[in-house]
Image (cartoon, helix red, strand yellow):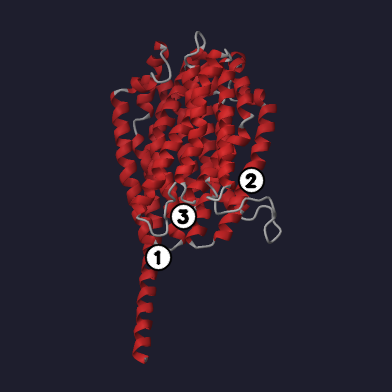
């Protein structure tokens, strides 16, 4: 499998070589949960109720993803920068620190999550009927937390090394296993939602096993170990990894907060069928978000590497390539949703009552989807360049400052359940524009200054060379 050459390769080629396998990997990654929902929604007699109940598990699942992203995506840009600076020893220390943080957090989440699954689900709004499906699903699902966090958390490092195809295969193994095992455990063995969780855990184990094989293989240039660093610390760079990882962490945690608010308001203003509709809308959103996230995250290693190597022109070119791919995609998706929202809803359910609620909700929810390209692109640049304060602020701004208050206020202003789904496009418009414009106003001047300094150094070097020749 060919390694991406960030040092001398074409910047567009680097992005495509990273983004395309990442796109396939993320699409397949969705199968872990999306396939579960597709099959759960088709369980005879109880599919709609079970689908809505499993929706109450999402906040906990999102929290698992948040910690994974904190130590995975938080460390990968730092790792790439050190590769750009030609310092593989520091890069190896960052990788090993992240791995330790992933292992420790996975074990803590597993045991605490299983022990408190019932109270957590009740806190998130689940009643007795919902707990019947949701609690067993969540407790089984959490047994795979360790394997899920290892496989997903180490993937950004595999991509940053240039082995994006290996990263894709990591996810492909688990996703295809889940696709095959779900119908066996759900229908053939008659285990229902518990069978979906068992199939997911087995799939996560297979993905993690492949990741560990790669880390120990000759392909991986960085030795994995559990020894202290040279200065006697277990977690060198731990603070830097966690602080940069706060951005993807906050994005996931605020998604969990938004899910809680949405479910609570929909139960109040519409009932369980609207919670099921939000579960369906969220599932469609996950699918359609994946390509634009793959494009932006696939650009991140190239931005970080070239920042470490002090190549501002290539960073600018990477951002332009990213936008030229992300914007057309979001425009096409927006048009498809506006024309045929029901087509996407029917992927998850054949229940006509649920379709009649979810299709118009999806239409509302995606009204300003185009601005997602601006939000993700701005966030990616901030994160890739280690601009922690900007990245964290805009993570909080869109979800906590905009979505949550709007989700609570709009239903009471006469929009009722529609108000819950309208909060998203308003936040996309305002948040996306604010994030991208701020990125242009803060990052572009810095890159211009780097260019001027580089030109000045080149001029001085040329002048020195001329003087030396004249002296000779």
| Circle 1 residue | 450
Q: Farthest residue to the top: give it.
A: 45
Residue 393: give x, y in percent of width and height: 49, 46
Q: Farthest residue to the bottom: give it.
A: 471
Q: Residue at x 58, y 37 (%)?
A: 208
| Circle 2 residue | 101
User: For the residues marked 3 and 1, what is the alpha-carbon distance in whole angstroms?
Assistant: 13 Å
Where residue 283 sits, quadrant-wise, is top left
Query: Which of these two is toward me, 70 or 277?
Result: 70
Query: Which of these two is toward me, 128 or 300?
Result: 300
For the question of whether residue 258 can be seen, the reply is: no
Q: Earlier in the sequence, mark 3 or mark 1?
A: 3
Q: Which label lies toward us, 2 or 3?
A: 2
* Quadrant where the image shows the C terminus: bottom left
For the question of whether residue 286 can be seen, the reply is: yes
Residue 195: give x, y in percent of width and height: 58, 19
Using the image, tell me which numbered label, if any, was put on residue 385. Answer: 3
Disc 3: CA contacts within 10 A as few (<14), some (14-19) or many (>=20)? many
Q: Which label lies toward us, 2 or 1?
A: 2
- As helix, strand or loop, the secondary structure at mark 1 comes to helix
Residue 328: give x, y in percent of width and height: 29, 39
User: For the residues marked 2 and 3, what is the alpha-carbon distance in whole angstroms?
Assistant: 22 Å
Query: Which of these two is toward me, 441 or 386?
Result: 386
Where residue 112 sits, quadrant-wise, is top right
Q: Please state if 396 lies on the left or on the right of 240 as rendered.
A: left
């Amino acid at each position: 499998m060919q390694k991406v050459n960030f040092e001398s390769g074409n910047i567009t080629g680097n992005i495509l070589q990273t983004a395309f396998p990442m796109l396939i990997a993320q699409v397949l990654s969705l199968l872990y949960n999306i396939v579960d929902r597709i099959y759960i929604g088709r369980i005879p007699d109880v599919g709609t109720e079970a689908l809505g109940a499993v929706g109450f598990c999402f906040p906990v699942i999102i929290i698992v993803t948040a910690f994974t992203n904190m130590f995975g995506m938080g460390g990968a840009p730092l790792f790439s920068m050190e590769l750009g600076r030609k310092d593989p020893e520091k890069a190896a220390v960052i990788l090993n620190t992240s791995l330790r943080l992933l292992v420790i957090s996975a074990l803590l989440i597993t045991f605490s999550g299983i022990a408190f699954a019932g109270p957590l689900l009740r806190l998130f709004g689940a009643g007795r009927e919902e707990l019947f499906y949701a609690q067993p699903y969540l407790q089984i699902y959490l047994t795979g937390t360790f394997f899920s966090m290892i496989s997903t958390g180490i993937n950004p490092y595999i991509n940053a090394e240039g082995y994006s195809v290996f990263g894709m295969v990591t996810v492909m193994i688990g996703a295809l296993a889940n696709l095959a095992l779900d119908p066996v455990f759900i229908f053939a063995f008659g285990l229902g939602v518990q069978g979906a969780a068992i199939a997911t855990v087995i799939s996560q184990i297979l993905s993690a096993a492949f990741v560990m094989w790669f880390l120990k293989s000759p392909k991986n240039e960085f030795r994995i170990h559990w020894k202290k660093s040279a200065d006697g610390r277990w977690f060198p760079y731990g603070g830097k990894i966690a602080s940069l990882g706060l951005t993807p962490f906050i994005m996931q945690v605020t998604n969990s907060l938004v899910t809680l608010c949405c479910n609570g308001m929909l139960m109040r203003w519409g009932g369980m069928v609207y919670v099921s509709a939000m579960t369906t809308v969220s599932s469609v959103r996950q699918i359609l978000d994946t390509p634009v996230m793959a494009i932006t995250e696939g650009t991140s290693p190239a931005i970080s590497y070239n920042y470490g190597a002090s190549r501002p022109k290539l960073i600018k070119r990477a951002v332009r390539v990213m936008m030229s791919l992300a914007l057309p995609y979001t425009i096409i998706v927006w048009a498809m949703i506006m024309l045929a929202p029901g087509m996407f809803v029917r992927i998850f359910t054949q229940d006509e009552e649920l379709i009649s609620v979810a299709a118009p909700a999806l239409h509302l929810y995606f009204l300003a989807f185009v601005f997602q390209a601006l939000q993700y692109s701005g966030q990616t640049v901030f994160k890739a360049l280690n601009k922690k304060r900007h990245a964290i602020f805009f993570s909080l701004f869109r979800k906590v400052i905009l979505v949550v208050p709007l989700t609570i206020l709009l239903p009471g202003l006469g929009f009722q359940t529609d108000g819950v789904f309208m909060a998203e496009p308003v936040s996309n418009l305002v948040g996306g524009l604010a994030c991208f414009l701020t990125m242009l106003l803060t990052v572009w001047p810095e890159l211009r200054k780097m260019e001027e300094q580089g030109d000045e150094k080149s001029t001085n070097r040329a002048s020195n060379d001329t003087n030396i020749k004249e002296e000779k």
